[in-house]
Amino acid sequence: MSSHLAALPEVSQRLCKLPAFWPVAARIWEGLDARAGRPEITPLISLDAAITAEILVAANSPVYGFSSSIYNVHEALTILEWDHVKRLLHAAVGGRLETDVRTEPLIQASWTHSLATAFFASELAPFFGIPEDRAYMLGLMHDIGRLGMLATYPGPYLDVAARTYRTSLECLGSEECVLGMSHCKAGLWLARVWGLPAEFSESAAAHHAMVIDSHWPAATLAGMACRLAHAGGFVFEHCKPVSTEEAISIAPPELLRRLRPRLGEIEARGRSRLLKSMNGFCPLDPLLSRN
């Protein structure tokens, strides 16, 4: 994957320019114009994977030389100078104007699915021993590869997304056949090139894995949250619907034993938080996010 992209620098450059969801980007732009500060802007940044990526990449850059990794927007904004943050945001939001308009429905579907995955990951976090704020970010960023591919190959990716699949794995195969890479491989490449903490690489690369790997808890968490988002109707691919039970079925028996009694609560709370965050940005009916 990396050697393929290294041979095509113009492709790798476009892959790094993730398209933000315009309603969120516009709200941030309005806030900056109104001289809003960190308390007002931080929650907005945390709603969008593309804009969050800009901030996390800067905070984890060797330029700053921090000894610990930065996992969330709040941490990043406490160490980055506010003027620098504003320049990053203006660039990210301004770059959104260059997005191919044909991909707008897919960007909205991706935004809704990623945000749903983020909230479900946050609710699942205690079962994996991962801090809730970190789990949220892993869920939000798990599909960065898809956003990069939408920006890089808008026409071909529209064709891939228009097809109907039995499973998400079939969609990965279609991406490989049409584009020469899957969004999981693209996400892995992006997270590594950007120098993000290893958990971001893991969750981007293996959230569709059907075999649990105890050495990759971040990927397992992101994968289960992704499947719960599918079960809730917050989908990107045209796939066969899955039940909540199917969504968690790949978990180890011990985890299932602890998870099942709390599953209804996890679903309800995650969905409530999601719909509250979506309000004012797009239709609240999950089925409208993909049609």
Image (cartoon, helix red, strand yellow):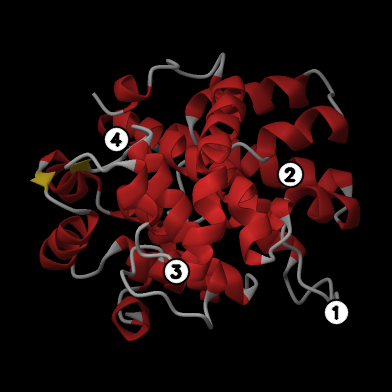
**C-alpha span from label 3 to label 2:** 48 Å
Quick check: can you spot residue 151? no
Q: Which residue is mark 1?
A: 67
Q: Are marks 3 and 2 in contact (CB under 8 Å)?
A: no
Q: Are marks 1 and 2 in contact (CB under 8 Å)?
A: no
Q: Earlier in the sequence, mark 1 or mark 2?
A: 1
Q: Which residue is mark 2?
A: 87
Numbered disc 4: secondary structure: helix
Numbered disc 3: secondary structure: helix
**C-alpha span from label 1 to label 2:** 24 Å
Numbered disc 2: secondary structure: helix
Residue 116's disc is: none
Q: Amino acid at mark 1?
A: Ser
Quick check: can you spot residue 33? yes
Quadrant assignment, res 120:
top right
Q: Earlier in the sequence, mark 4 or mark 1?
A: 1
Q: Earlier in the sequence, mark 3 or mark 1?
A: 1
Q: Are marks 4 and 1 in contact (CB under 8 Å)?
A: no
Q: Earlier in the sequence, mark 4 or mark 3?
A: 4
Q: Amino acid at mark 3?
A: Pro
Q: Amino acid at mark 2?
A: Arg
Q: Name the residue located 37 percent from the left edge and 34 percent from the top edge.
A: 234
Quadrant assignment, res 134:
bottom right
Q: Earlier in the sequence, mark 2 or mark 4?
A: 2
Disc 3 versus disc 1: nearer the observer: 3
**C-alpha span from label 3 to label 1:** 37 Å
Q: Name the residue located 74 percent from the left edge and 22 percent from the top edge.
A: 31
Q: Name the residue located 41 percent from the left edge and 70 percent from the top edge.
A: 205
Q: Amino acid at mark 4?
A: Thr
Q: Which residue is mark 3?
A: 253
Above/below status of 1 relative to 103: below
Residue 103's disc is: 4
